[in-house]
Image (cartoon, grey):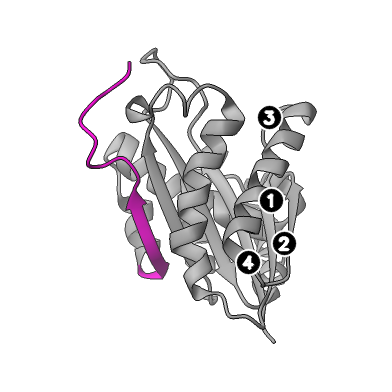
């Protein structure tokens, strides 16, 4: 029996228009490991940076990190055994029924991501723990939890599983997922692949969900 740990984070927003500071894409990124040793290593690494008097914040968060600290975090990540998977959604191509609610839009790409990126690699005697970064209000989080549990229930089938939502600062592995999601987002939103190029060797799945679509709804 193998324990599979999946940590997820999203990049992009739930706003569906072309206003300034609105993301073009919504990205689901998952990190999978079979051991939690990396979480301890990331915590130790943060303390190393503190001893070096580096400008370390309360937790690792790629968007707000100093560039040289962020680069070193990626270097530290690559010392450890992890894989990441990503599903990309160009939001303007989502049909109106998909964007009718945040929860509906959240569940739709998650279903395809889990079905194709995660489920095929699960064995019947595996045990799966899914830890997702918290998003939205307390009421919305309950909806997202229900949506994600429904996705896992449909795809994991006979594999024992549990879904947990936590703030990113609560788990170092959620911070690893954040760094992976940020790297992909920079590549597709800003045409900056520097961070992505550092970690792409650990990518096992990348899919643009509506790549073949030609109709934009806004």
Residue 128 falls in image quadrant: bottom right
The earlier-in-sequence mark between 2 and 1 is: 2
- Cβ atoms under marks 4 and 3 closer than 8 Å: no
Of badges 3 and 1, the one in the foreground is 1
Which residues lie in the magenta part? 201-218
Give the answer, above or below, for where 69 lies relative to 159.
Answer: above
Tell me the SS state at disc 1.
Answer: helix
Q: Is residue 78 visible?
A: no
Tell me the SS state at disc 2.
Answer: helix
- Cβ atoms under marks 4 and 2 closer than 8 Å: no
The residue positioned 30% from the left and 49% from the top of the image is: 193
Separation (CA) of disc 1 from disc 4: 12 Å
Looking at the picture, tell me which residue is in the foreground, 44 or 145.
145
The residue positioned 33% from the left and 16% from the top of the image is: 218
Tell me the SS state at disc 3.
Answer: loop
Q: What is the crowding at mark 3: few (fewer than 14 residues within 10 Å), some, or many (at least 20)?
A: few
Tell me the SS state at disc 4.
Answer: loop
- Cβ atoms under marks 3 and 2 closer than 8 Å: no
The earlier-in-sequence mark between 1 and 4 is: 1
The earlier-in-sequence mark between 4 and 3 is: 3
Q: Which residue is under mark 3?
A: 136
Q: Which residue is under mark 2?
A: 47
Of badges 4 and 3, the one in the foreground is 4
x, y percentage for residue 53?
Answer: 66, 53
Q: Which residue is under mark 4?
A: 157
């Amino acid at each position: 029996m193998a324990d599979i740990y999946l940590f997820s984070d999203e990049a992009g927003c739930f706003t569906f228009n072309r206003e300034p500071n609105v993301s073009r894409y919504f990205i689901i990124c998952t990190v999978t490991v079979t051991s939690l040793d990396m979480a301890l290593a990331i915590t130790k690494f943060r303390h190393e940076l503190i001893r070096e008097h580096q400008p370390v914040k309360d937790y690792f968060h790629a968007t707000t990190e100093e560039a040289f600290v962020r680069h070193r975090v990626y270097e530290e990540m690559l010392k450890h055994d992890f894989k990441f998977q990503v599903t990309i959604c160009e939001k303007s191509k989502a049909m109106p029924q998909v964007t009718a609610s945040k929860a509906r839009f959240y569940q739709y790409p998650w279903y395809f991501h889990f079905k194709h990126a995660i489920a095929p690699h699960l064995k019947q005697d595996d045990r799966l723990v899914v830890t997702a970064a918290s998003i939205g209000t307390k009421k919305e989080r309950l909806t997202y939890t229900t949506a994600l549990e429904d996705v896992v229930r449909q795809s994991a089938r006979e594999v024992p599983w549990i879904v947990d939502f936590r703030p990113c600062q609560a788990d170092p592995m959620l911070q690893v997922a954040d760094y992976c999601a940020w790297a992909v987002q920079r590549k597709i939103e800003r045409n900056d692949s520097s961070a992505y190029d550092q970690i792409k060797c650990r990518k096992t799945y990348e899919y643009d969900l509506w790549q073949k679509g030609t109709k934009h709804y806004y």
